[in-house]
Image (cartoon, rainbow, N blue to C red):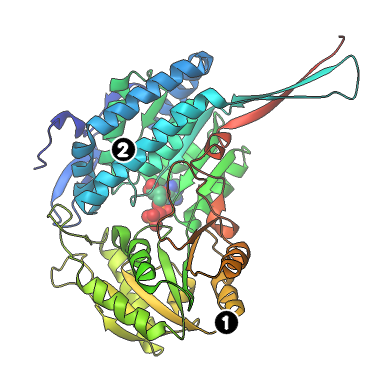
Amino acid sequence: MLNLRDPSLLREQCFVAGQWISAARTIAVTNPASGAVVAHVPRLGATETRQAIDAANGAWPAWRARTAHDRSALLARWHALILENQDDLARIMTAEQGKPLAEARGEIAYAASFIQWFAEEAKRVYGETIPSPISTQRIVVTKEPVGVCAAITPWNFPAAMITRKAGPALAAGCVMVVKPASQTPLTALALAALAERAGIPSGVLSVVTGSAGDIGTELATNPLVRKLSFTGSTEVGRHLMQQTAATVKKVSMELGGNAPFIVFEDADLDAAVEGAIVSKFRNAGQTCVCANRLYVHSKVYDQFARKLADALKALKVGSGEEEGVRIGPLIDDAAVRKVEEHLADALERGAQVITGGGRHALGRSFFEPTVLVGVTQAMRVAREETFGPLAPLFRFETEDEVVAMANDTEFGLASYFYARDLGRVWRVAERLEYGMVGVNTGLISNEVAPFGGVKQSGLGREGSRHGIEDYLVIKYINMAGI
Ligand code: ADP
């Protein structure tokens, strides 16, 4: 059993319309490291989702009418409660998601940072005045909350993907219904318990667990929902966009990536290895900003490959609850099979393994951190997101060639490169067709910067002052007769 300081944070009920509700049918939440059942959550559907939407719609007028200062104070209290319970929340997350406890604690702090940031931004939703072309008229522009919002979130960041949506939504004066991934609903429910404790009014934030198809369809088609924010696969994102089209909802989409990580010949190789490990192997390679393709200049290719393989041998694989573990299990067996397929395809087409190379001796969904050399653009790893601890190293000769290869994908979320030459740094940063570029770093996410993609990686930005704009609509008022 989970050893929590506050056992009431482990909820087996959903928070709908300000009430904790159960259901006859449930979903078992399992620990990917052991297969043990951690808890059961309700398997809700369209009916309960409608109740949550109706309650949100009912709560909206009073919530938006509060001053930004008031909403900000409530969010600040939620932020403080999340941090006070950081350890329990991290334990719940590691139990259902598998990531090492240190990473889970880090994610809770990261998740909380969005609540704090948007609590502050709530007070800075500025409008504008525009000089009118007519002398008797005045033009004023205000920003208003879009209304009832829906969030559908993935399992790889069970806390942060919720707070970077709920934070700006509530700050802006919107109300929200969240549908967390069925693999990781417990962190979401614990966050809802803390929101309730913070005094966020009934109906303003609901969390509905259950059937993705039923809940997702209701959220995407109910006319009361004015905005849908989704983080997950491009395939599901496309489907949701189609569903929202019928009622012309505002959408934010954080979808798949296929991040290039480029090491130029003038790079600091030790720093590049460190960056590659952070970028590629964080959360066992299961983040949408994880390096998917590592392009290394031929002059430093062998040296980089050796250093990376050596560094990986030192990373401990194991249950996230164990001290010192750096790589936890993958989320499930399907995730492992995808990594195996990418590996087999690369080996068949001539790549070679220099470290790792298969399932870990620990069994279940543990996979060895693996490095492949001799990788080419013809292999599946070049086109598809592997979402696991497999680092394929591609060789390149020139800047033009590597930029073309890096951009040769329908995705455009994160990209990374290591170089020292200032001219090259600017040229490459400008030419990469990505929403985010990390130069000499493998870690780019934080609450103050705009996170998001271009091309088929999505629409909208989360975090930064831009993050709240996605939850606002513009109103223009023309005052005549002056
Ligand atoms: P991942 O590859 O991260 O599992 P998914 O896109 O499959 O990404 O899942 C992300 C979220 O979308 C989860 O909450 C999942 O339950 C939900 N989801 C999956 N399929 C659908 C669907 N057809 N409609 C709505 N939501 C869905």
Residue 185 in view, yes or no = yes
On-image quarter of the N terminus: top left
Circles 1 and 2 in contact, beta carbons < 8 Å:
no
Side (left or right) of 95 relative to 447: left
Residue 188, which numbered label? Answer: 2
User: Can I make out residue 177 in this image?
Assistant: no
Q: Residue furthest bottom?
A: 350
Q: Residue 105: where, in percent of width, then height?
A: 25, 44
Q: Is residue 348 above or below residue 314?
A: below
Q: Amino acid at mark 1?
A: Thr
Location of residue 248 in the rendering, given as x and y in whole percent from the top left corner: 63, 39
Q: Whole-percent x and y of residue 201? A: 38, 18
Frontmost residue, 362 versus 149: 362
Relative to 136, is 358 above or below? below
Please state which of the two labelled residues, at mark 1 or mark 2, is closer to the viewer.
Answer: 1
Query: Residue at coordinates 35% horizontally, 76% vertically from top-left?
Result: 341
Q: Closer to the camera, 271 or 163?
A: 271
Disc 1 CB within 8 Å of nearest ligand 1 atom: no
Q: Residue at x 15, y 62 (%)?
A: 318
Quarter occupied by the C terminus: top right
Residue type at mark 2 is: Ala
Above/below status of 368 relative to 105: below
Q: Quadrant of residue 480?
A: top right
Tell me the SS state at disc 1: loop
Query: Residue at image x 39%, y 25%?
Result: 75
Q: Is residue 376 above or below residue 65?
A: below
State the image coordinates of residue 106 (x, y, percent, origin top left): 28, 46
Residue drawn at x 54%, y 54% as measured from the top left: 453
Crowd rating for badge 1 (residues with CA inside 10 Å; few <14, some 14–19, many 20+) = few
N-terminal-most mark, 1 or 2: 2
Residues 339 and 15: in front is 339
Task: Quickly name the residue at label 1.
Answer: 398
